Image: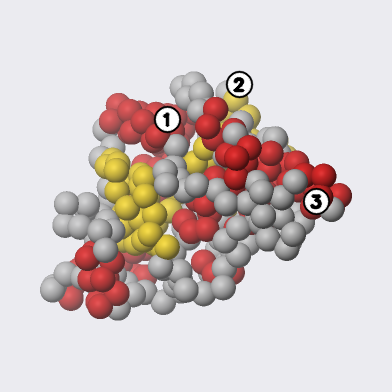
Amino acid sequence: MLAIIGGTGVYQIDGLEVLEEVAVDTPFGPPSGPVVRAAFKDRTVLFLPRHGRRHGLLPHEINYRANIFALKKLGARQIIGFSATGSLREDISPGEFVIPDQYFDFVKGPREKTFFGDGVAAHVSTADPTCPDLTAWISHWAEQCGFALQTGKTYACVDGPRLGTRAESHFLRMAGCDLVGMTNIPEVFLAREAQLAYATIGIVTDYDCWMDDPSQHVSVADVIARYGGSVENAKALLLALLETPLPPVDPAYRETLSTALLTPVDQIPAAKREWLDVLRQ
């Protein structure tokens, strides 16, 4: 089943028939809100707004573990996220879509970045953290719909909620990053730990603040002014995707924990085995 994580501006999706709203209890606390189980023609999907339905959660307040766990528990096997992003490259323009395939963790605050620890040891490879099959599927249909979309880029994740300094923006550019945002880490890595295929569609809103022209520096007012049309395009792209068959899940994503888990299962307390079993499904 496909799950959709909505970012800024994507709190609901017209065209989906809401079947039910599911309040999911997780061992990691509450998710950002009830998970919406919805139908589009003959397909059932899950939907969860990352910041909550009324955008009440800042990036560092989101319970990423609970979000990913809730979606996996309800049957998700693939996730598409939507995220507002800033561009660190002149050839990535506001209004475009970008699917990153690499991530640079510049988060310094105490976000919970793994399901593991406290007696359950695992080390999951994130050399290639996103799903190329999902990326190719989205890219193909974006082209068919006439939407500009780039792939093969690197997303730098920062703490927020403040917008960055010019020094930080230039540092991230020197580090080889192409996009900057506040929410995809640890989401992408938790999806890998949960044996989920994951890709995020970055909706480019601005040039951050690395350009010499101050009028190009990011501000919330400019982001909101530019963002509406891009969000509607993103929703249109999603509905176009739902008209087509999902790509198959690479077996590698379904076997992540087979070699990553170090603690013998029979030595893990029963309560922890319950949530581990969900991740291993």
Image quadrant holding the C terminus, namely: top right
Res 234 label: none
Of badges 2 and 1, nearer the viewer stands 1
Q: Nearer the viewer, residue 175 or 242?
A: 175
- Please provide percent x and percent y for residue 95: 28, 50
Residue 256, quarter of picture: top right
Up/down of 155 relative to 233, above or below = below
Residue, x 37% and y 45% (percent of image)?
Answer: 101
Q: Which element is circle 1 on? A: helix
Q: Residues within 10 Å of mark 1 (few under 14, many from 20)?
A: some
| Between discs 2 and 1, the one toward the N terminus | 2
Residue on which disc 1 sits: 133
- Please provide percent x and percent y for residue 233: 36, 42
Residue, x 52% and y 52% (percent of image)?
Answer: 189
**Left or right relative to 256: residue 227:** left
Res 42 label: 2
Q: Nearer the viewer, residue 14 or 47?
A: 47
Going by the numbered disc 3, the residue's amino acid type is Ile
Image quadrant holding the N terminus, namely: top right
Residue, x 38% and y 59% (percent of image)?
Answer: 104
Q: Which element is circle 2 on? A: loop
**Left or right relative to 61: residue 182:** left
Going by the numbered disc 1, the residue's amino acid type is Asp
**Left or right relative to 165: residue 199:** right
| Between discs 2 and 3, the one toward the N terminus | 2
Q: Nearer the viewer, residue 254 or 142?
A: 254
Residue on which disc 3 sits: 268
Residue, x 22% and y 53% (percent of image)?
Answer: 93
